[in-house]
Image (cartoon, rainbow, N blue to C red):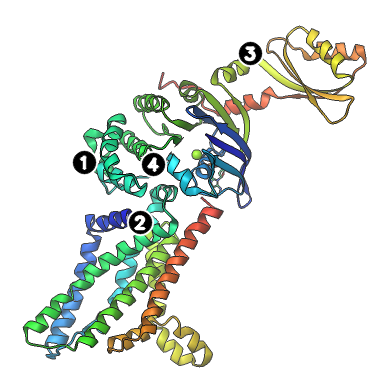
């Protein structure tokens, strides 16, 4: 449904995102997780056509955002970090305005408006000025605005920031319900939020994608396994056999280095067993030198440390 | 575009700003009408119009100062730009909204016209038409400058000061031009909105003047779309 390829955005000297690529499948809720300043808002602003990228492409339903912005914008409902609301309008007038802006058919709009207001539970405040609404209600009006015109895709930038625990739970419930017939990208810096709502998670840090997985796998890997990379000189088959014999190794993947007597090995092992020493001894005995040993798991762990991983108030 | 126009016109009248500006305009023009036109028993309105046109130098910056700044401040620019409308439609909708309030304000001078007729005066129609068209075109140009200024900043006070400064320069450009003379004077004359207004107001309905004002307005609105686009490309 959404294809993001090699997206890069520089603000002058600042590289906000670098080479970001991922895809969003039709009908899924994708979590876009990263600490503050990671580049989430920048990426979403590019996908929605608010600003152009420095390089790279975004296509939605096969339409490129640069070549066919109209077609892309029609398919996307966007709730930015700061909900875009005219405080001097009533909820009802504001939604009518959005419908005109998005060219929604008048007959369709009448019933759609009522459905949207029911769904996000703002029917009873429809004649109030947005200025007089609480933060939670404003966020709902923001969400209603994104739903105008029944777009297939919803892009929600940190929709629960600044809300109280009760409101957070309600908004999350709402997003889950919307996920039944929308494709959603939900950004967040809160790990449990993404775990609670999303089927798949893309993790971004310092402008780069560092992991893509299901929330379960991510937390499992983080908890129980370590991952590192070795570059070893020697025949692939022999070396692979030796490593697999080591107690504690769970998963092994071989990478080509371009040289035919050197290979890269991605090794995943149980956390409480240090497999590095036995691997070293085995290889040394066999006469295959280790050229490089680099921990991979650590970078992901560091990122998780920066994320908000606990939610005392909510649970 | 229509949606944006409608919203902005409503916003003007939801707030006191439109009423205040119209009130001030009407109050000042009434003074000129009572002590100028009526006192001298003149059966025309062109003198009044050329006297009160200076008010626009103050009114237009205030009228337009929040027209684009507000959207950047409260984040609605994202909504407008990510909707399937083009930037030029956004700018045009905003411009027309300001122009609408200006027209309502300007329409208040019809009252003076009615009084002149009631008192038995018979103004010359071509003079009148020239005067009104001229006033309208100057107003449209001033508003375009104001809209442009409000695209430059997030702060409405700064926007008002920028457009006021530009209008001030335009007001004194004729004396400057005649002072420096030569080629520079010719260049400065390209920005002289008021010299052409004098022609129109004396009943000379010169098509090149009309085209001049319309192009002037179009250029500033175009520059406004460029500013918005440029910011999207470089910043956020
Ligand atoms: N308009 C801007 N001008 C310059 N730098 C910016 C701008 N917007 C964001 N940045 C920088 O780009 C990086 C990514 O920001 P952002 O996309 O807002 O991250 P997130 O939404 O994940 O918190 C940050 O380092 C931020 O300082
Ligand atoms: Mg952000």
User: Which mark is on residue A127?
Assistant: 1
Q: Kindly identify the residue that appears in the image at 73 percent across and 21 percent down.
A: A228
Q: Nearer the viewer, residue B77 or B17?
A: B77
Q: Dot 3: within a 10 Å radius of its alpha carbon, few (fewer than 14), some, or many (20 or more) residues?
A: few
Check whether the beta carbons of the residues at disc 4 and disc 3 lie within 8 A of each other. Answer: no
User: To which chain does the residue with label 3 belong?
Assistant: A
Which of discs 2 and 1 lies nearer the camera? The answer is: 2
- Name the secondary structure under disc 2: loop
Q: Quadrant of residue A314?
A: top left
- Residue marked by disc 2: B1
Residue A179 x %, y %? 43, 27
Check whether the beta carbons of the residues at disc 2 and disc 1 lie within 8 A of each other. Answer: no
Rendered-image quarter of ligand 1: top right
Residue B33 x %, y %? 16, 82
User: Which mark is on residue A83?
Assistant: 4
User: Which mark is on residue A215?
Assistant: none
- Name the secondary structure under disc 1: loop
- Residue marked by disc 3: A224
Which of the two discs, 4 and 1, labels the residue nearer the N terminus? 4
Q: Kindly identify the residue that appears in the image at 35 percent across and 25 percent down.
A: A170
Residue B189 x %, y %? 45, 85
């Amino acid at each position: 449904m959404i294809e993001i390829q090699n997206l890069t955005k520089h603000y002058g000297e600042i590289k906000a995102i670098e080479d970001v690529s991922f895809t969003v499948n039709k009908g899924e809720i994708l979590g876009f997780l990263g600490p503050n300043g990671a580049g989430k808002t920048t990426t979403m602003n590019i996908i929605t056509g608010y600003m152009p990228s420095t390089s790279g492409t975004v296509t939605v339903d096969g339409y490129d955002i640069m070549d066919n912005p109209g077609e892309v914008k029609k398919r996307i409902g966007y709730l930015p970090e700061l909900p875009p609301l005219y405080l001097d309008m009533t909820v009802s007038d504001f939604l009518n305005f959005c419908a005109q802006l998005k060219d929604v058919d008048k007959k369709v709009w009448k019933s759609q408006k009522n459905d949207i207001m029911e769904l996000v539970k703002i029917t009873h405040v429809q004649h109030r000025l947005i200025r007089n609404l609480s933060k939670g209600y404003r966020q709902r009006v923001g969400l209603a605005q994104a739903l105008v015109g029944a777009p297939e895709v919803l892009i929600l930038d940190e929709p629960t920031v600044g809300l109280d625990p009760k409101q957070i739970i309600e908004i999350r419930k709402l997003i889950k319900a919307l996920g039944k017939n929308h494709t959603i990208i939900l950004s967040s810096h809160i790990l449990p939020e993404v775990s609670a709502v999303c089927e798949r998670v893309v993790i971004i840090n310092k402008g780069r994608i560092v992991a893509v997985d299901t929330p379960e796998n991510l937390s499992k890997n983080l908890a129980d396994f370590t991952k590192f990379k070795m570059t070893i000189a020697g025949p692939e088959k022999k070396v692979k056999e030796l490593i697999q014999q080591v107690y504690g190794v769970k998963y092994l993947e071989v990478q080509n280095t371009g040289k035919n007597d050197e290979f890269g090995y991605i090794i995943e092992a149980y956390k409480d067993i240090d497999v590095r020493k036995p691997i070293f001894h085995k290889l040394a005995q066999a006469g295959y030198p280790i050229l490089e040993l680099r921990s991979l798991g650590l970078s992901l762990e560091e990122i998780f440390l920066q994320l908000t991983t606990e939610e005392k108030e909510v649970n | 575009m229509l949606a944006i126009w409608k919203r902005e016109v409503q916003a003007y009248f939801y707030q006191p700003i439109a009423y205040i500006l119209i009130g001030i305009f009407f109050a000042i023009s009434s003074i000129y009408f009572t002590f100028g036109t009526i006192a001298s028993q003149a059966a025309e309105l062109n003198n009044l119009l050329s006297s009160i046109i200076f008010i626009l130098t103050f009114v237009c910056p205030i009228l337009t100062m929040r027209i684009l700044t507000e959207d950047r401040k409260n984040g609605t620019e994202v909504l407008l730009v990510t909707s399937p409308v083009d930037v030029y439609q956004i700018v045009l909708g905003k411009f027309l909204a300001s122009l609408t309030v200006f027209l309502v304000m300007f329409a208040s001078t019809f009252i003076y016209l009615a009084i002149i007729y009631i008192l038995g005066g018979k103004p010359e129609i071509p003079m009148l038409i020239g005067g009104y068209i001229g006033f309208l075109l100057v107003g449209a140009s001033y508003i375009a400058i104001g809209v442009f200024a409000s695209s430059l900043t997030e702060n409405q006070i700064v926007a008002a000061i920028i457009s006021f400064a530009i209008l001030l320069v335009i007001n004194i450009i004729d004396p400057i031009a005649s002072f420096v003379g030569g080629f520079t004077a010719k260049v400065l004359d390209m920005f002289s909105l008021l010299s052409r207004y004098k022609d129109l107001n004396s009943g000379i309905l010169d098509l090149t003047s009309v085209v001049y004002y319309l192009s002037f307005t179009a250029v500033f609105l175009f520059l406004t779309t460029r500013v918005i686009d440029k910011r999207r490309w470089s910043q956020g």
